[in-house]
């Protein structure tokens, strides 16, 4: 059987080009504090928060306060991407972060508008997208499009830098306490994204990693030329290619017995309505099983030729079917003991162990989150917490309702359509007098 393998140069789009934009690139949020009440507070200004703010704008809901630790819309998303040296998105053009049902300039239209700035490879990907095939989106295009969304939906002027500490719902309103101020609103949407998954305590006793060991979203210590990468997903794939390009000799510890080169980090069928419908007809245990099976990391096809070539040349040593047992300081750097008893020594080790959805724990009262198996208790139709219907979620936290697509850009658009419509409807039909600081 002949297998289609996309060419690796799809991974190499130039980064940092200057795009004509409606507004300034990477517009920061506002300094100071917002008013102490609003119609809607959105916590988190990543792609999910941006989708919610833009959809509410289309619904005519303008009294919106967006709060984000970083303050810049999509700041954490692009910081993570740039730390990994990622030049193309993991999702195709059809996963555009715009608003469902409104004929805005979509991601694909935006890319076509800037045709003259694109490379031949990038232009070919646009033709693939137009023909309904899988395509690859340059990070440059995606970033400029996000700026376009921010500007055209007036999101930056509604965004404040703040770290939210508590979200306290009552029957009438929700109070959001941040580090510098408090805002009360009839509706709050949590768009908190995902935090990196920490190493098991057994590896080094928990807490700060040993010298020379770092996580994927931290700066990698510049030590020597031998590196260990632990993990089997796209983040690991980027770390591997970056390390190989920098001339490192790399050991890759991958738990699976074989690398899985899937085209998206979850099966693409889950992004289509019929894929999501597989989730609707299934009970809780069936959903947990599907989430377990389809959330497992995998690598884009495009990486295969590069990694296989590096392995053949001895620049990459792959420890397949191996798990890490312990990580520690060695005389010559980092020592990694595998379950098989094998020891690997290197100058540095980078851990890409996946991410965990932020489901509102630590912000909302525990009985509202009602966490079971890592998932909150949500209303299937509105994505509101069943114990606090005025607080809803968009993003990975909606995984047990929407399926694996919830954690990706396409899923944010689907979740947002439900959440924004339900909030706009409720604001139109039940004007609640909000008592600030209640
Ligand atoms: C390197 C990388 C590449 C990826 N590439 C793709 C891709 O190509 N396509 C795709 O579909 N998905 C991709 N993903 C998955 C991706 O994370 C999501 O699609 C997207 O970032 C999620 O958006 P979000 O808004 O839910 O989360 P985030 O982008 O993480 O945004 C959440 C925001 O909430 C803020 N926040 C959290 N808690 C608080 C608090 N208490 N107070 C204030 N602010 C808070 C965070 O600081 C952050 O800014 C990628 C993920 C990574 C890590």
Image (tube, helix red, strand yellow):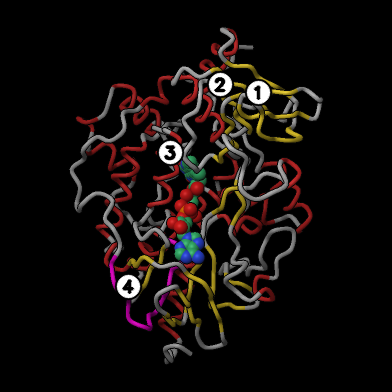
Q: Find the residue positioned furthest to the right.
A: 340
Contact? badges 2 and 1 (CB < 8 Å): yes
Chief secondary structure of the magenta span?
Answer: loop
Element carrying mark 2? strand
Residue 191 in view (yes/no)? no
Contact? badges 4 and 2 (CB < 8 Å): no
Contact? badges 3 and 1 (CB < 8 Å): no
Q: Which sits earlier in the primary sequence, circle 4 or circle 1?
A: 4
The foreground one among 135 and 81 is 81
Q: Position of residue 359 (x, y in %)?
A: 60, 62
What residue is shown with label 2? 226
Dividing the picture into quadrants, the one containing residue 178 is bottom left
Q: Which sits earlier in the primary sequence, circle 2 or circle 3?
A: 3
- Identify whether 93 is placed above or below 13: below
The Cα atoms of the two marked residues, 4 and 1, are separated by 59 Å
Q: Which sits earlier in the primary sequence, circle 3 or circle 1?
A: 3
For the record, the magenta segment spans 30-44
Which of the numbered marks, if any, corresponds to residue 60?
A: 4
Q: Position of residue 342 (x, y in %)?
A: 77, 22
Q: Which sits earlier in the primary sequence, circle 4 or circle 3?
A: 4
Q: Position of residue 151 (x, y in %)?
A: 25, 57
Please rate how many residues cluster around mark 1, counting C-alpha atoms within 10 Å: few if below 14, some from 14 to 19, many from 20. many
Please rate how many residues cluster around mark 4, counting C-alpha atoms within 10 Å: few if below 14, some from 14 to 19, many from 20. few
Q: Which sits earlier in the primary sequence, circle 4 or circle 2?
A: 4
Asked if ligand 1 lies within 8 A of label 4, the reply is no
Identify the residue shown where x is 55% and y is 45%.
Answer: 271
């Amino acid at each position: 059987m002949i297998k289609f393998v996309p060419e690796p140069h799809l991974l190499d789009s130039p980064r940092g080009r200057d795009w004509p934009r409606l507004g300034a690139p990477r517009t920061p949020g506002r300094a100071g504090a917002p008013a102490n009440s609003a119609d809607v507070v959105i916590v988190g200004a990543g792609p999910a928060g941006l989708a919610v703010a833009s959809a509410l704008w289309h619904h005519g809901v303008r009294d919106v306060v967006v709060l984000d630790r970083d303050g810049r819309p999509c700041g954490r998303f692009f910081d993570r991407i740039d730390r990994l040296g990622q030049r193309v998105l993991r999702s195709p053009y059809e996963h555009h972060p715009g608003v469902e049902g409104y004929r805005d300039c979509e991601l694909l239209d935006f890319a076509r508008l800037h045709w003259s700035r694109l490379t031949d490879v990038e232009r070919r990907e646009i033709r693939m997208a137009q023909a309904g095939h899988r395509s690859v989106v340059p990070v440059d295009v995606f970033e400029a499009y996000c700026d376009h969304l921010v500007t055209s939906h007036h999101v930056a002027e509604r965004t404040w830098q703040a770290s939210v500490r508590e979200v306290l719902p009552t029957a009438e309103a929700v109070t959001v306490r941040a580090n510098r101020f408090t805002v009360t609103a009839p509706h709050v949407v949590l768009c908190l994204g995902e935090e990196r998954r920490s190493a098991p305590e057994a590896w080094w006793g928990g807490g700060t990693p040993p010298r020379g060991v770092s996580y994927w979203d931290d700066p990698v210590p510049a030590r020597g030329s031998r590196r260990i990468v632990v993990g089997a997903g796209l983040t690991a794939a980027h770390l591997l290619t970056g390390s190989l390009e920098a001339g490192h000799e790399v050991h890759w510890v991958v738990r699976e017995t074989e690398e899985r080169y899937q085209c998206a980090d979850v099966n693409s069928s889950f992004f289509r309505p019929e894929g999501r419908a597989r989730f609707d007809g299934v009970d809780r245990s069936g959903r947990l099983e599907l989430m377990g099976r389809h959330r497992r990391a995998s690598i884009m096809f495009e990486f295969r030729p590069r990694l296989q070539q590096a392995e053949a040349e001895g620049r990459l040593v792959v420890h397949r079917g191996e798990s890490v047992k312990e990580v520690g300081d060695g005389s010559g750097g980092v020592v990694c003991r595998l379950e098989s008893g094998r020891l690997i020594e290197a100058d540095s080790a980078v851990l890409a162990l996946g991410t965990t959805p932020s489901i509102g724990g630590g912000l909302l009262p525990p009985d509202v989150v009602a966490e079971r198996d890592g998932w909150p208790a949500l209303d299937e139709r509105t994505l509101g917490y069943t114990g606090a219907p005025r607080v809803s979620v968009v993003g990975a936290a909606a995984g047990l309702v929407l399926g694996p697509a919830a954690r990706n850009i396409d899923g944010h658009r689907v979740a947002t359509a439900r959440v924004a419509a339900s909030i706009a409807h409720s604001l139109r039909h039940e004007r609640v007098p909000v008592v600030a600081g209640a």
